[in-house]
Image: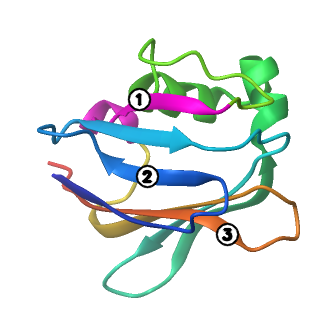
Amino acid sequence: MVTGPEIIYTKDCVSYLGYAPGQSQVIMINVTRLVKTVFMDNCVENEDTNRVSYRVQNFSVCNFLNNRLISKLFSNFYEEFVGNTTDMKCPIRPGIYYLKNSITNNSVPSFHPSGNYRFLVNIKTEKEGPYSAKFLWRYRVTRT
């Protein structure tokens, strides 16, 4: 079971980031200025123990968008979250972009332990800069 995302964002480069009107499976982003670089921090935490299971910091989204073979794991999430709904390239030009809010059980690797987890994604436009957007999904993994 996946819930979320909970979304927090600043208005430094977007005027809206949330569900598309009348939708619960589509996220809309209204980018208001050219974004030349994007970095992402990801973290998977066990909600019961607060232990970090996985962490990646300062992942270069632009390098990845230009060559999705850089990371098989992120390629799988890209297909689940972006797929063919939006042509994502850097620099990201002003405009409206759509993302799927459909992270599924197929996104969770088979070696993932059972339990309750948080998946946090923090987006920033500078490697050491403040966050522009934060996403939080909660999910439960049960293995039989």
Residue 52, above or below 21: below
- On screen, residue 128 versus residue 125, left or right, reads right
- The alpha-carbon separation of the residues under discs 2 and 3 comes to 15 Å
The mark nearer the N terminus, 3 or 1, is 1
What residue is disc 3 on?
A: 131
Q: Position of residue 66 (x, y in %)?
A: 80, 19
* Circle on res. 98: 1
- The alpha-carbon separation of the residues under discs 3 and 1 comes to 20 Å
- On screen, residue 62 versus residue 23, left or right, reads right
Q: Amino acid at mark 2?
A: Tyr
Q: Amino acid at mark 1?
A: Tyr
Residue at image point 14% right, 48% down: 144
What is the span of residues highlighted in magenta in the rendered image? 94-109
Q: Nearer the viewer, mark 2 or mark 3?
A: 2
The mark nearer the N terminus, 2 or 1, is 2
- The alpha-carbon separation of the residues under discs 2 and 1 comes to 11 Å
Residue at image point 49% right, 41% down: 30
Residue 64, above or below 108: above
What residue is disc 2 on?
A: 16
The mark nearer the N terminus, 2 or 3, is 2
* Front-lying residue, 120 or 37: 37
